[in-house]
């Protein structure tokens, strides 16, 4: 039963999440700012940061802080409150008081309590109780950051209190190496024994009597969170190459440990690489450690196309991230661009499509790295980089990943599923600027993104679905009605897409969206029971008045729209299609006559 429970847990979508389904990145980022501010104990800086809030919110927050800060939490009680799942604020206050007791008490640094606290923080990350992992990891980040600020001698004096560290270690190693040694000891799990055939069936032999069953998973996540805490504390920014190699090796060890650890460990490895400012160090770490141990496992593999096909989605994310970093000079196979190389997207399509098992709303980490690689920041948004290779990469993603793999249009390929359609919808919405990334692609590319296969399968088939499959709902009269499982998501995504299109204010772009929808089905609005096309064409309700510039924009848009309808009528293959476009013309004329001012009608 224990094994089944573990298997169920590890299928959770978040890359570095515990059983509360809250990512480690979100938890630490949310809490660190407050903890560090509290550790400084500077009232002036505190009031400065709170000055941006409204007066009402500021007074409430100050009253709460005054009550809580008037009496410091006892040192031993802070460890219990670090696991509080009520709010991150409680964990932040506990961490602040713990750090204040260790470093800023009246007697100066309390070396004995600091060593005890460090040991408790390392062990606490291996606990799955409440919010222990988030609270202890975020506190450890601030603890290490503050400890570095006290100087290397003071830091080593704290570490001297640990019996596990010998005097020779303290003399020869830097604090980052010593912390790694303590972290590995606190989160020990015997991965080598796990992979050995004979002992793999016996828990006693596998874990040497120390770690059993579900505790193994807790220790694995504890090590992951611990390494991330060290990275975010800034200890590795200007350290030796061998120290970086050791931490990277630990993350690679986690990557090979279990399938469900691949994405979290690569996520942490990307963060480790991002914290390094020296391009030569990144190159050395990549060529000497990452490539041979993680990317190029077969030493004699010189066929680039074959290497592409055996890459996993996590490896793709890491390679794409590495190739964005400046001042680097990688050896084979990273010396060739991954995404913009001819035929690369087709070779990578299976791995990219496999990420559909990561459920909405979070996409697999590979997609964030792909969008960052293909686009560049511009006026608070991201636009596609100049060059035909980037345009072809987007076209390849739509054709080989979305249409062929996710929507099941490939001959002999697997059929589409709800998860695959969901990922296809997210990719399409991202490229249509209706996501948090706000990616703006050229208008000419929208026709490729919103091709007939995409509009029909992602939007029309979902929004028009009814009858036998889907969620059962009871009408007011008691009759059964059902809808497609993806209908709520698709409806909200389509609304967001239409809203972003209307906000752009570019008639050519708006017309492109209209063409895409109507080319799939001239009765798009009627069948989907939405006002998508009408909204893009600025056919608003009677009570909504337009400004002068909006009137000019609509006049220009309608002129182009009528020309498009005329072309469709002339080139129609059947009278049925021609009649459908004539009806659209009539609908526009009727709207114009009904809503036009009296002096213009």
Image (cartoon, grey):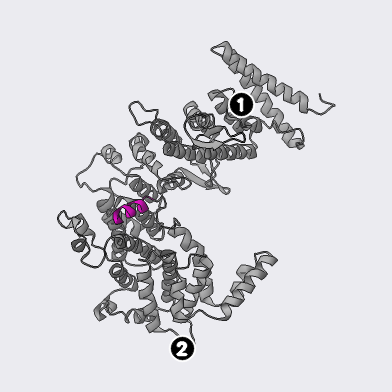
Residue 437: image location, x then y, percent: 52, 46
Kind of element beneath mark 2 = loop
Q: Is residue 335 above or below residue 147?
A: above
Kind of element beneath mark 1 = helix
Is residue 329 among the parts visible in the rendering?
A: no
Nearest-to-viewer mark from 2 and 1: 1
Q: Quadrant of the C terminus?
A: top right
User: Which residue is found at the position 43% from the left and 64% from the top?
Assistant: 130
Residue 521: image location, x then y, percent: 55, 23
Question: What range is drawn magenta here?
Answer: 1-11
| Along the viewing direction, whichever of 129 and 67 lies nearer the viewer | 129
| Along the viewing direction, whichever of 165 and 358 lies nearer the viewer | 358
Is 490 magenta? The answer is: no
Is residue 576 among the parts visible in the rendering?
A: yes
Q: Is residue 438 above or below residue 261?
A: above
Is 10 magenta? The answer is: yes
Outermost residue to the right: 599
Residue 524: image location, x then y, percent: 58, 26
User: Which residue is found at the position 29% from the left and 45% from the top?
Assistant: 333
Residue 161 horizontal side relative to residue 22, left or right:
left
Residue that badge 1 annotates: 526
């Amino acid at each position: 039963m224990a094994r089944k429970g573990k298997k169920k847990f590890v299928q959770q979508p978040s890359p570095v999440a515990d059983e509360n389904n809250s990512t480690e990145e979100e938890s630490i980022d949310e809490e660190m700012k407050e903890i560090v501010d509290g550790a400084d104990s500077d009232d002036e800086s505190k009031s400065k940061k709170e000055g941006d809030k409204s007066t009402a919110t500021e007074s409430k927050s100050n009253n709460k802080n005054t009550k809580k800060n008037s009496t410091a939490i006892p040192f031993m009680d802070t460890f219990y409150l670090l696991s509080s799942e009520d709010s991150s604020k409680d964990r932040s206050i506990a961490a602040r008081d713990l750090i204040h007791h260790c470093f800023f008490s009246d007697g100066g640094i309390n070396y004995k309590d600091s060593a005890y606290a460090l040991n408790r923080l390392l062990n606490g990350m291996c606990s799955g109780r409440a919010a222990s992992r988030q609270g202890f990891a975020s506190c450890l980040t601030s603890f290490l950051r503050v400890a570095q600020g006290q100087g290397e001698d003071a830091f080593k004096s704290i570490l001297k209190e640990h019996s596990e560290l010998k005097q020779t270690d303290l003399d020869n190693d830097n604090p980052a190496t010593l912390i790694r040694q303590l972290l590995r000891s606190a989160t020990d799990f015997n991965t080598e024994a796990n992979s050995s055939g004979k002992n793999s069936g016996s828990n006693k032999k596998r874990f040497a009597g120390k770690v059993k069953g579900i505790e193994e998973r807790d220790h694995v996540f504890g090590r992951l969170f611990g390494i991330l805490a060290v990275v975010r504390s800034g200890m590795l920014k200007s350290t030796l190459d061998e120290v970086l190699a050791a931490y990277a090796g630990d993350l690679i060890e986690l990557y090979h440990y279990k399938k469900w650890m691949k994405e979290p460990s690569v996520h942490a490895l990307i963060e480790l690489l991002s914290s390094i400012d020296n391009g030569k160090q990144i190159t050395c770490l990549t060529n000497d450690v990452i490539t041979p141990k993680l990317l190029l496992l077969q030493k004699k593999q010189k066929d680039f196309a074959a290497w592409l096909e055996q890459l996993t989605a996590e490896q793709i994310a890491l390679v794409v991230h590495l190739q964005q970093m400046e001042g680097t000079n990688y050896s084979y196979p990273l010396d060739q661009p991954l995404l913009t190389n001819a035929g690369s997207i087709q070779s990578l399509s299976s791995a990219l499509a496999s990420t559909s098992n990561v459920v909405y709303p979070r996409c697999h980490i590979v997609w964030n790295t792909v969008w960052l690689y293909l686009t560049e920041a511009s006026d608070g948004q991201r636009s596609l980089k100049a060059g035909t290779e980037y345009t072809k990469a987007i076209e390849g993603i739509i054709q080989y990943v979305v249409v062929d793999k996710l929507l099941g249009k490939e001959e002999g390929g697997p059929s589409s599923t709800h998860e695959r359609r969901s990922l296809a919808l997210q990719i399409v919405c991202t490229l249509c600027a209706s996501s948090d990334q706000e990616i703006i692609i050229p208008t000419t590319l929208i026709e490729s993104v919103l091709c007939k296969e995409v509009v029909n399968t992602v939007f029309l088939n979902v929004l028009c679905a009814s009858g036998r499959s889907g969620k059962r709902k009871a009408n007011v009269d008691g009759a059964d009605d059902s809808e497609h499982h993806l209908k709520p998501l698709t409806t909200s995504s389509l609304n967001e897409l239409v809203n972003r299109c209307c906000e752009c204010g570019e008639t050519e772009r708006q017309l492109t969206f209209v063409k895409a929808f109507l080319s799939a089905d001239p009765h798009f609005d009627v069948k989907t029971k939405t006002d998508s096309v009408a909204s893009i064409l600025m056919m608003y309700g009677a009570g909504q008045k337009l400004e002068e510039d909006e009137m000019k924009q609509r006049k220009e848009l309608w002129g182009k729209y009528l020309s498009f309808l005329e072309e469709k009528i002339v080139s129609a293959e059947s009278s049925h299609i021609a009649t459908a476009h004539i009806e659209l013309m009539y609908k526009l004329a009727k709207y114009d006559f009904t809503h036009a001012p009296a002096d213009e009608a």
